[in-house]
Amino acid sequence: MTTKWVLVADSSCAQLYKFAGNADLELFMEFDHPESRLKGSQLASDRAGRQQSKGTGHGTFSDSTSLKQQEAERFAKELADTIEKARLNNTIQEMIIAAPPHFSGLLNHALSKHAKALVSANVEKDYTRLSATELQARLAPHMRVTGTA
């Protein structure tokens, strides 16, 4: 029987669970990205630099991408790298991702095409605050395990 992996994430934390089909979800690893919880002003160490503006030829002092967005992208990349390493080690053969729509998109962008092929379901909900029991109940329609080990 193949183990199904479940990644539950938002821009500041994530949990990776494994599910063998005959037991409860088992927490395998937790991730924390406290920088995503900081205010933009706390992330900036200095004033924004000059950026080339479009159209008028005058420069601007605004960031081209918000610092909070950059931190969310950085965390999505960190999670994608972890998934890719597990894929290369043959640890993960199938997974479910549950994340809010915006962060789900960032994860999808960061995942390799081979890692994307392992995703059997992408649930665009924030389930990071649920217990393992509640999470398993919410994801039950996607939790059927098939195949052999």
Image (cartoon, rainbow, N blue to C red):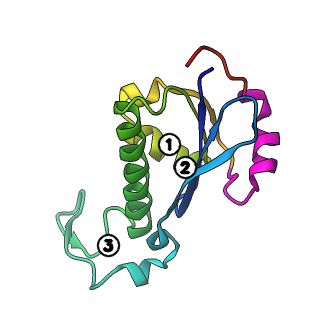
- Kind of residue at disc 1: Gly
Q: Which mark is residue 95?
A: none
| CB within 8 Å, label 3 to label 2 | no
- Kind of residue at disc 2: His
- Residue drawn at x 81%, y 49% is 134
Percent coordinates x, y for residue 15 in the rendering: 58, 53
Q: Which residue is mark 1?
A: 105
- Kind of residue at disc 3: Ser
- Within 10 Å of the Cα at label 2, are there few (<14), some (14-19), or many (20+) other Cα atoms? few
Q: Please provide the residue range marked out in magenta.
A: 126-143
Residue 110 position by quadrant = top left
| CB within 8 Å, label 1 to label 2 | yes
State which tag comes first along the sequence, 3 or 2: 3
Q: Which residue is mark 2?
A: 102
- Residue drawn at x 68%, y 52% is 126
Q: Secondary structure at mark 3?
A: loop
State which tag comes first along the sequence, 1 or 3: 3
